[in-house]
Image (tube, helix red, strand yellow):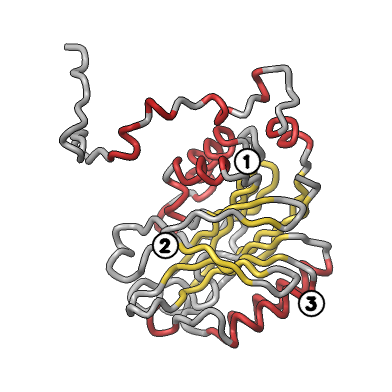
């Protein structure tokens, strides 16, 4: 990894107002370019505004005129942009997608793989965990609910991701966003020796939904590196120093303190993770039995 400057956007998205939201995305890209940003991440479904039951009405094809406009703005500013939107799937249930738009004009994507219970009736889940590269840094994406599953971050790290971006659309009702994020995203960073960079929608969407905002960067030791939890829109900029993560990933340290923990896994013991266990603790595969615990 090389030194990387990233930006995280707390953005207010008006529900269904694609042109207005797109203009705002382009303005933040221009600001990022002026500040020498390498990577900028926008919140989940910021293009259309987050809605479960209305997302299909404004979902967009990729590629399309809209994705082309964002791609051109990223190319013009020399910035890699991660932009959230509802992507048409052909089934009537769109994907929750994070476009990855590179300065060379290429466009890739990540589709949210873990849908919340309230999302399953309205969206199609993705089935890949890709890792992307800018040449300076390798990164993966976990959208909102994805980040509650430790396996996602572990797979991305094992594939070489040095940063995991976590775009959100979390409403005010969920409570203290910083306190919640620090409970589990610090663990994702520490356990997998990655930077974690999260951002969220903020403010009202014009249709009665309020989002709590938040932007946070956590270093590979689980410590907050930069943060913004103001109530308004804004762009948090942070410089990522590669020394620590390179020491860990290149196995340069002579101390266990800077170990790459994933090197020490014993996959032969982790069968229950892939076989599946239901909420009652009963294995979904009847051929796999668990020993009885102490009485």
Mark before the other along the chain sequence, 1 or 2: 2
Rendered residue at 66%/39% (across/down): 219
Report x, y in % for residue 142. Answer: 51, 54
Rendered image: mark on residue 126: 2
Report x, y in % for residue 280. Answer: 18, 36
Tell me if label 1 and label 2 are in contact, CB under 8 Å.
no
Tell me the SS state at disc 3: helix
For residue 147, above or below residue 121: above
Where does the N terminus fall, quadrant-wise? top right
Residue on which the image places disc 1: 194
Q: Is residue 50 left or right of residue 240?
A: left
Rendered image: mark on residue 76: 3
Q: Is residue 197 visible?
A: yes
Mark before the other along the chain sequence, 1 or 3: 3
For residue 259, above or below residue 207: above
Q: CA separation, marks 3 and 2?
A: 30 Å
Rendered image: mark on residue 258: none
Q: CA separation, marks 1 and 3?
A: 29 Å
Q: CA separation, marks 1 and 2?
A: 23 Å
How crowded pointer 3 is (Cα within 10 Å; few <14, some 14-19, many 20+) is rated as some
Rendered residue at 28%/40% (across/down): 276
């Amino acid at each position: 990894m090389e030194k990387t400057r990233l930006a995280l956007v707390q953005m207010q998205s008006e529900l269904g107002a694609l042109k207005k939201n797109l203009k705002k995305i382009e303005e933040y890209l221009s600001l990022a370019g002026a500040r020498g940003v390498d990577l900028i991440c926008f919140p989940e479904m910021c293009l259309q505004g987050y809605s479960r039951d209305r997302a299909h009405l404004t979902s967009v094809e990729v590629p399309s005129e809209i994705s082309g406009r964002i791609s051109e703005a990223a190319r013009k500013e020399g910035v890699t942009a991660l932009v959230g939107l509802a992507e048409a799937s052909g089934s009537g249930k769109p994907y929750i997608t994070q476009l990855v738009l590179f300065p060379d004009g290429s466009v890739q994507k990540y589709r949210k793989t873990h849908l919340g219970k309230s999302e399953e009736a309205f969206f199609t889940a993705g089935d890949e965990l890709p890792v992307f590269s800018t040449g300076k840094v390798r990164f993966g994406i976990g959208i909102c609910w994805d980040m509650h599953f430790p396996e996602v971050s572990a797979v991305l790290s094992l594939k070489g991701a040095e940063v995991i971006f976590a775009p959100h659309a979390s409403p005010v009702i969920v409570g203290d966003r910083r306190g919640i994020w620090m409970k589990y995203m610090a663990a994702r960073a520490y356990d997998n020796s990655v930077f974690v960079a999260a951002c969220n929608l903020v403010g009202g969407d014009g249709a009665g939904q309020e989002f709590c905002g938040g932007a946070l960067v956590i270093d590979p030791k689980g410590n907050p590196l930069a943060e913004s939890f103001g109530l308004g829109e804004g762009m948090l900029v942070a410089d990522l120093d590669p020394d620590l993560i390179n020491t860990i990933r290149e196995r340069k340290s002579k101390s266990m303190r800077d170990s790459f923990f994933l090197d020490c896994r014993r996959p032969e013991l982790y069968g229950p993770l892939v076989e599946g266990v239901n909420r009652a603790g009963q294995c979904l595969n009847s051929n796999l039995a668990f020993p009885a615990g102490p009485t």
